[in-house]
Amino acid sequence: MSRYWTIQLSDRLAVLHNWTDQVTAKANYIALPDSDFSTYGAPIARDSILFSLGAQVKDRSGLAFGIHLDGSIGSRAQSYVGMADIRWAW
């Protein structure tokens, strides 16, 4: 950009394979005897693509601005998370 600012780009790409498509959790309350219960979630995709993209602009004084996007794309669902930040290090 200029001699006072630097830009840093980041990316990641991965393939996720789940051996099971059922989401089950078993729990209980320690203080209550015989309080066992199970929860069942929505089925998840067996194969998904995970990705991450980011950019950060930083100057020499320690001020930085960044954006970041994480995502997961599967046959049954899509999920996206975006973040923006402002940092200052001294």
Image (tube, rainbow, N blue to C red):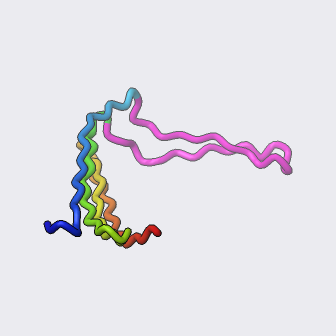
Q: Verify whether residue 37 appears in magenta.
A: yes
Point 27% across, 62% down: residue: 56
Point 27% across, 39% down: residue: 48
Write down the region rendered in magenta. Answer: 20-45
Where is residue 68 shown, x and y percent of the image? Answer: 29, 60
Residue 61 at least partly seen: yes
Residue 73 at least partly seen: no
Question: Which residue is more in the foreground, 61 or 25?
Answer: 61
Q: Verify whether residue 4 appears in magenta.
A: no
Image position of 43 (left or right of 9): right
Where is residue 57 shown, x and y percent of the image? Answer: 25, 66
Query: Looking at the rendering, in which quadrant would you find the N terminus?
Result: bottom left
Image position of 41 (left or right of 56): right
Point 23% across, 43% down: residue: 75
Question: Which residue is more in the foreground, 69 or 86?
Answer: 86
Where is residue 12 shown, x and y percent of the image? Answer: 26, 43
Point 31% across, 34% down: residue: 16
Question: Which residue is more in the foreground, 32 or 57?
Answer: 57
- In this view, the residue farthest toward the top is 19
Question: Which residue is more in the foreground, 75 or 15?
Answer: 15
- In this view, the residue farthest toward the left is 1
Where is residue 87 shown, x and y percent of the image? Answer: 40, 70
Q: Is residue 82 above or below residue 36?
A: below
Q: Main secondary structure of the magenta part?
A: loop
Q: Dividing the picture into quarters, in which one does residue 84 lie?
A: bottom left
Tally of marks: 0
- In this view, the residue farthest toward the front is 3
